[in-house]
Amino acid sequence: MTIRHRFTTALRGLTTNRSRSFLTVLGIVIGITAIMLVVSLGAGAQNLILGQVQGLGTNTIAIIPGREPTGPSDSAQLFSDSLKQKDIVALENKANVPGLKSIMPTVLGADIASYGANTYQVSIFGATDLMASIFDLNPKYGSFFTQDDVASRADVVVVGSKVTEHLFDSADANPVGQKIKIKGRNFKIVAALPPSGGGSLFNFDSMVIMPYTTVQDYLLGIKYFQRIIIQAVSDEAVTVTADDIRITLRESHGITDASKEDFSVQTQQDLANRLSTITGALTWFLVAVASIALFVGGVGIMNIMLVAVTERTREIGLRKALGATDGDILWQFLIEAVMLTVLGGIIGIILGSSLAFIIALILSKGLGVDWQFIFPWGGAALGFSVSAVIGLVFGGYPASKASKKSPIEALRYE
């Protein structure tokens, strides 16, 4: 029997029992659809996160208090108070860090803001006037506070769009000049931000931004910083500048052993690489979970093929009586299994990528998230090849059992 005849015979067998063929292929379709959906959405999420990180500028360096954890159980100094004003003075010294362009200490908090009878839970971001340029914030009304406001610990605040909406009953209201109360203290609004959208790395919509000195003294009562953000003079100077920062802070903290640093220095490229690794690992973990559906689908294929072999016993006996060999029968049923799983893989690839496209469209158009649809070629190749292998593996036993049937006993089967 020629290869072409084997394929046509297998195809005829599948089209004769369409409902059974549909049930056989359903598990594979679900498994491949899940894989395509997870891989595509994972790639889109990775692209969104990395885009937001890189949007801060590749020449940005962050100094984080506390020793960098070396493992899941190492969190002894994760929330340290090691970064203080003396470090700012040391870093601003051009002799120590010649590649430093600008420096911005930051502190973070949360509290209830109120205006009249309206209240709203806000995130508090204490920074300097560099906040606007580093994060590309352009106020809808008013203008950012100045360095003089930082130096004088002024009671001024920049509010996000949701803060405006909840406290002044409209996101389009102009609250500049009004005073809101936080922790019993009045703060004058000097600027209001437009909606940042769901794709922002930080949720500026629900944030109030103040001079870090004001937040330290009047709201948090602390003398340290949670982050120090530095901009290097150029992208090429980032690596050298990061090394100079480490050396300067070791001297400032009296540290001689680099393994005992009570701070960590992180460039945007470092952060991008780590986030890429994390999102990639999470995506493939979810793929592994979704692959369980493929295994279940493979078991279902084997069971249904075994039933098909039993139902077609007389057909097998008749074909053998007409001269078909054990190999012809084996290949017929094996090709049927592979054709089913490959068809299921193709349907799953189309369905999964279509669902991923629809979700990406909803996120980008409906929710305003900068989410791009990415067709996962790797996931498609994986799904197609795995579906073919499943057909060979789980279709092998039923095909072998069919080929070993005695033609005489098969013809007697009722």
Image (cartoon, rainbow, N blue to C red):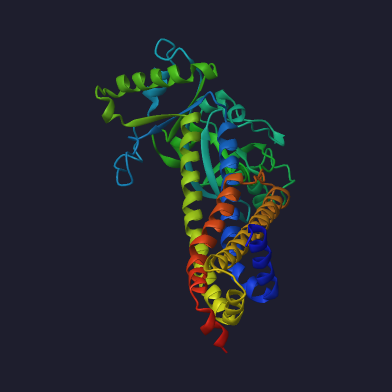
Q: Residue 224 falls in which quadrant of the image? A: top left
Q: Position of residue 174 (x, y in %)?
A: 73, 42
* Vertical side of 101 occupied by 309: above or below: below
Q: Residue 56 falls in which quadrant of the image? A: top right
- Of the 4 image quadrants, the one containing the C terminus is bottom right
Give the tally of numbered discs: 0
**Does any portion of residue 156 appear in the rendered image?**
no
* Residue at the extreme top of the image, as rendered: 95
* Vertical side of 344 occupied by 412: above or below: below
- Please name the residue shown 66% across and 42% down the image: 196
Q: Position of residue 124 (x, y in %)?
A: 52, 42
* Residue at the extreme left of the image, as rendered: 257
- Of the 4 image quadrants, the one containing the N terminus is bottom right
- Please name the residue shown 45% across and 20% down the image: 239
Q: Position of residue 278 (x, y in %)?
A: 46, 43
Residue closer to the observer: 356 or 13: 13
Residue closer to the observer: 382 or 116: 382
Residue closer to the observer: 333 or 140: 333
**Does any portion of residue 278 appear in the rendered image?**
yes
Q: Position of residue 402 (x, y in %)?
A: 52, 73
Residue closer to the observer: 26 or 321: 321
* Vertical side of 3 occupied by 81: above or below: above
Viewed as shown, does residue 375 lie left or right of 231? Answer: right
